[in-house]
Amino acid sequence: MPVLTVKTDKKNITVENGASIIDVCETEETSILFGCRDGACGACMIRVVENPQHLSTIEEHERDFLETMAAREDERLACQCKVLGDVTIEVSE
Ligand code: FES
């Protein structure tokens, strides 16, 4: 099973393949914050530190929002991501 590493909290969390980050982070009480849960507020912005290819593909809705926010290449919206393999994330400053 994949391991989601939340660098900000120094947590290595084993998750089901395809688990949504929002569900995992709320169960594990990480410091990633969520607001709208729909890719519209930016509260859940994360940086993908390792293995971005192990997150679900970015969809148009998320891409549009990230472009509007002038997000960095390694930033994603945690509420839109599913874990498909080992990946390391941290809260985006
Ligand atoms: S919680 Fe609002 S964009 Fe993710």
Image (cartoon, rainbow, N blue to C red):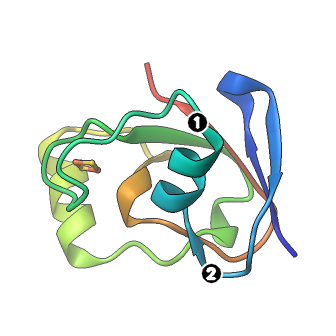
Circle 2 SS class? loop
Name the residue at 17% across, 50% down.
36
Q: Nearer the viewer, residue 60 or 77?
A: 77
Q: Is residue 41 above or below residue 61?
A: above
Left or right: 63 as drawn, with respect to 88: left
Q: Nearer the viewer, residue 71 or 90?
A: 90
Q: Residues within 10 Å of mark 2 (few under 14, many from 20)?
A: some
Q: Residue furthest top?
A: 93
Q: Residues within 10 Å of mark 1 (few under 14, many from 20)?
A: few
Name the spot of residue 66 as percent of width and height, x first. Answer: 25, 50
Q: Is residue 68 above or below residue 8?
A: below
Left or right: 15 as drawn, with respect to 79: right
Name the residue at 22% across, 38% down.
70
Which residue position is annotated with label 1? Answer: 29
Which residue position is annotated with label 2? Answer: 18
Left or right: 86 as drawn, with respect to 61: right
Which one is in front in this view, the residue at disc 2 or the one at disc 1? Answer: 1
The residue carrying mark 1 has its beta carbon less than 8 Å from ligand 1: no
Identify the amino acid type marked 2: Gly
